[in-house]
Amino acid sequence: MDGRVAPTTAPVPIHVLLLRGINVSGRNRLPMADLRALVTALGYDGVATYVQSGNLVCSGRGGPERAAALVADALARELDVTVPVIGRSAAHWAHLTTTNPLAGLEDDPRKLHVTFLDGVPEPGRVADLADEATAFAPERLEVVGADIFLHCPGGYGETPLSNAYLEKRLGRVATTRNWRTVGALADLAGVGG
């Protein structure tokens, strides 16, 4: 041994990116093959999508917020698709899959959802939302940082706790995924249980 220290390589961060308002056809149509190609061209590796609604996992330097901003900018510039993109780290994703405060209320993953916000809302707005949401029982919500866990016994299509409602109340951009999608993205990111 000559006293030199071998360089260590930090693991490359894995990001989960969620596009809001992507459709298979019509307005904001975006084939997932095009999305994967665009994100790969930005220099990200391991690019994978899940279903046709803008769920993406990739790895690359920088944080998930930076990746989300770069992808949103490239979508607008290269594909003329202007949609919000919200990012989370794989570590954050792993944590939320094991700490859902509403998981004990429901065995059916189609009735559990997570709304992802583009930042942490103001505490006063969160308190007001919690007070208002009691009127929607048996619907339930729990705000944890920039994530909102939802239990929608009648299904998400029937809940008043929609993206539009939550955005208006919290002043943040929102996009929602069902619990099955959350689990599938955890698997794609290599953090599934």
Image (spheres, rainbow, N blue to C red):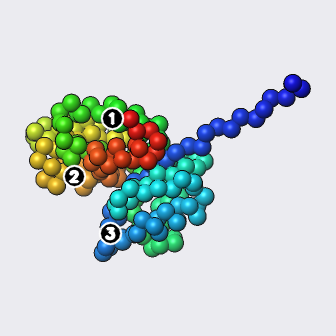
Asked whether, in this view, residue 88 is left or right of residue 175, the answer is: right
Asked whether, in this view, residue 154 is left or right of residue 189, the answer is: left
Q: Position of residue 146 (x, y in %)?
A: 37, 41
Q: Position of residue 43 (x, y in %)?
A: 61, 58
Cα distance between the residues tagged 3 and 1: 31 Å
168 is higher (above) or lower (below) than 81: above
Using the rendered view, name the quadrant where residue 94 is placed. Answer: top left
Front of the two marks 3 and 1: 3
Q: Position of residue 100 (x, y in %)?
A: 29, 34
Quarter in which the N terminus is drawn: top right
Q: Position of residue 116 (x, y in %)?
A: 34, 46
Q: Secondary structure at mark 2?
A: loop
Q: Residue at x 60, y 43 (%)?
A: 12
Asked whether, in this view, residue 119 is left or right of residue 160, the answer is: right
Residue identified by numbered label 3? 24
Cα distance between the residues tagged 2 and 1: 17 Å
Quarter in which the C terminus is drawn: top left
Residue identified by numbered label 1? 144
Q: Residue at x 10, y 39 (%)?
A: 137
Residue 67 visible in the current orientation: no
Categorize mark 1 by other alpha carbons within 10 Å: few (<14), some (14-19), many (20+). some
- The type of residue carrying mark 2 is Ser
Q: Residue at x 47, y 69 (%)?
A: 34
Closest to the observer, 20 or 7: 7
Q: Secondary structure at mark 1?
A: strand
Q: Residue at x 24, y 55 (%)?
A: 164
> Which of the two discs, 2 and 3, labels the residue nearer the N terminus?
3
- The type of residue carrying mark 3 is Val
Asked whether, in this view, residue 65 is left or right of residue 99, the answer is: right
Q: Secondary structure at mark 3?
A: loop
Count of picture labels: 3
Residue identified by numbered label 2? 162
